[in-house]
Image: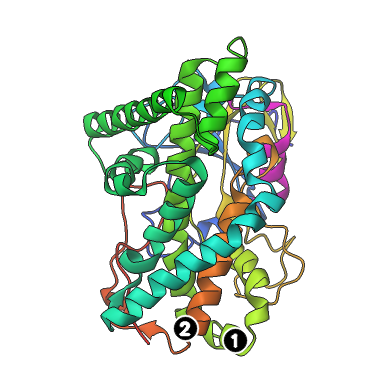
Amino acid sequence: MTETAQPTIPQPYPFSDPHRLDIDPRYARLRQEQPLTRIRMPFGEPAWLATRHADVRIVLGDPRFSRAASVGRDEPRNSPRQTDTGILQMDPPEHTRLRRLVAKAFTARRVEELRPRTRAVAEELVEAMVAAGSPADLVAHLATPLPIRVICDLLGVPVTDQDRFHAWSEAIVSTTSLPPEVAESYVEQLLGYMAGLIAQRRTAPTDDLIGAMVRARDEHADRLSEEEVVRLAAGLLAAGHETTVTQIPNMVYVLLTEPDGWERLRADPALVPTAVEELMRFIPLGATAAFPRYALEDVELGGELVRAGEPVVVSIHSANRDERVFADPDRLDLGREVNPHVGFGHGVHHCVGAQLARMELQVVLETLLRRTPGLRLAVPESELTWKSGLLVRGLTAMPVSW
């Protein structure tokens, strides 16, 4: 441990601009030589960066590290603005109180009940794409509308409003893609939209998730504020589709461009559930680290002493390539049986919609394998365009043929 060592000068972070789905080689070197390192992000105070799987799990899962302690601090971040991230900025028991409100909607049993409906939506969208003829944009025809329709059904949000709330949701994952004043305006419009839907439920109760949240608020007003319900509903709507919209084309892209990808799944479609887990491990969805945790006391981590009050950010994609945990970690292995990836996070903030996302991704791949077994890129890989200025990496469009 280097408690008495001279403090090192924080390295600028991110180390490089995200390029496609590449991972900067510095992460591999840090895992070997300096698994906890000092960094300075574009905005906010310096931080520690954890790169090994074991350390990442500790930061995400150990109550000695707090998200709530970021409130009122100049937290390390990629965006000039600091935003209230609602439930993502809470610790238990406040976090538990809100998460319990929605967790029942995302249990494995409830998600399995949604699978037939999701299959029907996927079949309808792929049918329309095939009917339109190739080449077709997989992002526009399938990746974007499917998660939106599923989360709208679950929450009780009119899918006819999708263009509006999908645009507003970019503010949730934007770092520099939107000017700060536009991002702030989009967040306010999304919150106002959800407040309107909540008000409707009070005059016309429903059995959807928003209706259940309204009933819980009205029956237990001492435990839930109106603002908490509005922010939670808005966060579920945005997070419930934004990352899956991005991850669907990411997964198809990797399967079409990595050796032993699409062809192996086509030969053995029963591998799809295992393949989804491997793709969640393999794909560096996050463009950068985010959501720092603050040490509530001195903690030994990665051979260093993190002092009370210091922030730590974690690299999920570095943890998912840790050679101490994953055999041959830089190789896509669709049959990988032992796969403790942290693609959905870990600890109390583990993605509440992880089961829903898994199911949607499985259904999409199963439908494409069945309906378009000859799927391929319709343009050279070099002509694909990628999103920028967001917390997530993904394709803006994906022309495919079959």
To which residue does mark 1 refer? 264
Amino acid marked by disc 1: Arg
Give 12 or 341, whichever is nearer the viewer: 341
Determine whether, in the image, residue 130 is placed left or right of residue 227: left
What secondary structure characterizes most of the magenta part?
helix
**Residue at the image position 61 percent from the left and 51 percent from the top:** 354
Answer whether residue 64 is magenta in the image: yes
Does any portion of residue 5 appear in the rendered image?
no
- What's drawn in magenta, residue-wise? 52-69
Where residue 232 appears, x then y in whole percent?
50, 30
**Residue at the image position 72 percent from the left and 63 percent from the top:** 339
Give 223 or 124, whichever is nearer the viewer: 124
Nearest to viewer (mark 2 / mark 1): 2
Determine whether, in the image, residue 212 is placed left or right of residue 402: right
**Residue at the image position 31 percent from the left and 48 percent from the top:** 160
To which residue does mark 2 refer? 371
Where residue 351 appears, x then y in whole percent?
60, 44
The extreme right residue here reads 338
Is the residue 98 above or below the residue 220 in the image?
below
Element at label 1: helix
> Alpha carbon of mark 2 to alpha carbon of mark 1: how far?
16 Å
